[in-house]
Image (tube, rainbow, N blue to C red):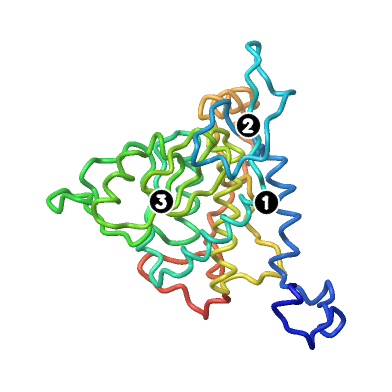
Amino acid sequence: INAEYMGPFWSPGSIPLPAMSQYPAIAKSREEDIKLMLAADVHIGTKNLVYEMTPYVHGRSESLADKDGKLVNIINLGKTWEKLMLAARAVAAIDDPSDVCIISAREMGQRSVLKFAQYLGCQAIAGRFTPGTFTNQLTKQFQEPRLLILTDPTTDHQPIRESSYVNIPTIALCNTDSSLRFIDIAIPANNRGKHSIGLMFWLLAREVLRLRSVIMRDQPWDVMVDVFFYRDPTTADKKDENEPAHDAHEEVYVPQPFAEPDTAVVAAGQSWGGGAAF
């Protein structure tokens, strides 16, 4: 605090500093979230660095250098967490969750996108993006979202360009070599790994639900982060082949499908419910 700005009658002891327990709960969860980011390699960038991503880079790692001696850029996870909280507030500010569209043309992020849309009730486009979805009203897939969330600005360049034509705010996971053109909120993160993408969308979905008071901040979310991770279909088929076959006379237990609790899922077309805990 600047003493000259506060005036001559101010002294450092006149304003008591708050105790650690008086800080908001969102500040306490920052350390735990950053530990999860480190475990998921969210901080691992690429060898290339664009000028716009320079403020989000902490440094370069010599241990991850390749044979040619090129160093890998390390992302500052403190700024990643701050941008994640900012993006969550932008998503929670949308009254109707169906007005939010999340897109992933990259295969590693398609499962995360679908799970994000399931628990928040927003629209998802996993796979190839049809040109004209945001600009051509004659197409069957025409949409008019109020907010756009992307996995990679490089692979999702077509929806980014169309969103600039119709003035749609854009949130994107940006690596060190990603262009920030037409990106309103850039979340610096590793958008190449399946664990990194899944964890970032899991943290974003959890924070949005907390801001909308769907789940309490002091209680853990009952949805595990593994649900958002990409699963290789070929690996799953090999696991099924290695499992022993059941006997014809043996009773096989078939689990019954169950519905997700109403407190964890927001249906499309419905309001969030509850007041925003901003």
Residue identified by numbered label 2: 73
Give the left or right position of residue 132, taking residue 197 as reference: left
Q: Nearer the viewer, mark 2 or mark 3?
A: 2
Label 1, label 3: how many angstroms apart (C-alpha)? 24 Å
Q: Mark 1 or 3 closer to N-term?
A: 1
Callout 3 secondary element: strand
In front of the other: 153 or 102: 153
- Say which amino acid is labelled 2: Asn
- Say which amino acid is labelled 1: Gly
Residue identified by numbered label 1: 78
Residue reaching furthest to the right:
13
- Say which amino acid is labelled 3: Ile
Callout 1 secondary element: helix
Looking at the rendering, in which quadrant would you find the N terminus? bottom right
Label 2, label 3: how many angstroms apart (C-alpha)? 27 Å
Q: Nearer the viewer, mark 1 or mark 3?
A: 1
Label 1, label 2: how many angstroms apart (C-alpha)? 15 Å
The residue at 68%/35% (across/down) is 59
Is 274 above or below relative to 192?
below
Give the left or right position of residue 169, taking residue 253 as reference: left
Residue identified by numbered label 3: 102
Q: Mark 2 or 3 closer to N-term?
A: 2
In front of the other: 19 or 217: 19
Q: Position of residue 65 (x, y in %)?
A: 68, 20
